[in-house]
Amino acid sequence: MLKGHSYAESHDEGETWNYDSEGLEEHPYLYNMVIHPDDPDEKLVAAAASPSTGHHASLFSTIYRKNGDEKWEELSDGLDCEGAYLAALASDPNDPGSYYAFNNIGLYQLNAGKHRWSKMPVKWETDFNDQHPSFLIIQTS
């Protein structure tokens, strides 16, 4: 991966690309993304230092958030990062700006406007600790 090319965005159907990776230097490997449903300038990504640390040995993954032209900022308070596969991310369909993250350690919620994840009280089987979730769907009732 070229330095500074962790995140690329196109606004002309892929004819040209803008690279905006400032802040992702420590964790340039991005795997999953969610965009605020009402504000496409707010984005969250699951990130790791490399594919190996995100998917295999020495597991460590985290989450970053970006708003508009601001640089990416790590958003890991309350999130179990050590020993964690890259998280699957989803937005809350009933509360725009609230998000969920799901990894092999647990399910986490980030309320709109907050900077700290809360681990949700879900019964967790130890078998889940070795599984790598690839997606998360939030369903409304």
Image (cartoon, helix red, strand yellow):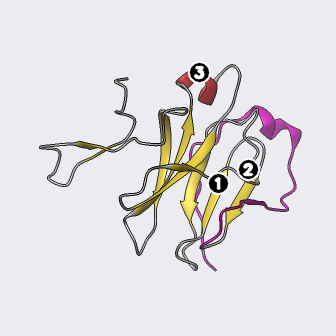
Q: Is residue 121 above or below residue 87?
A: below
Q: How many marks are shown on the rendered structure?
A: 3
Question: Which residue has dot 3 on it?
Answer: 52
Q: Residue at x 80, y 62 (%)?
A: 120
Q: Residue at x 55, y 60 (%)?
A: 90
Question: Which residue has dot 1 on it?
Answer: 101
Residue 63 horizontal/vertical position (percent)? 59, 47
In the image, taking residue 121 as reference, residue 54 lies left or right, namely left
Callout in the foreground (2, 3): 2
Q: Identify the element where label 1 is drawn.
A: strand
- Determine the CA span between mark 2 and mark 3: 20 Å
For the magenta stretch, what is the residue range?
113-141
Q: Is residue 114 magenta?
A: yes
Question: Which residue has dot 2 on it?
Answer: 79
The type of residue carrying mark 1 is: Ala
The type of residue carrying mark 3 is: Ser
The type of residue carrying mark 2 is: Leu
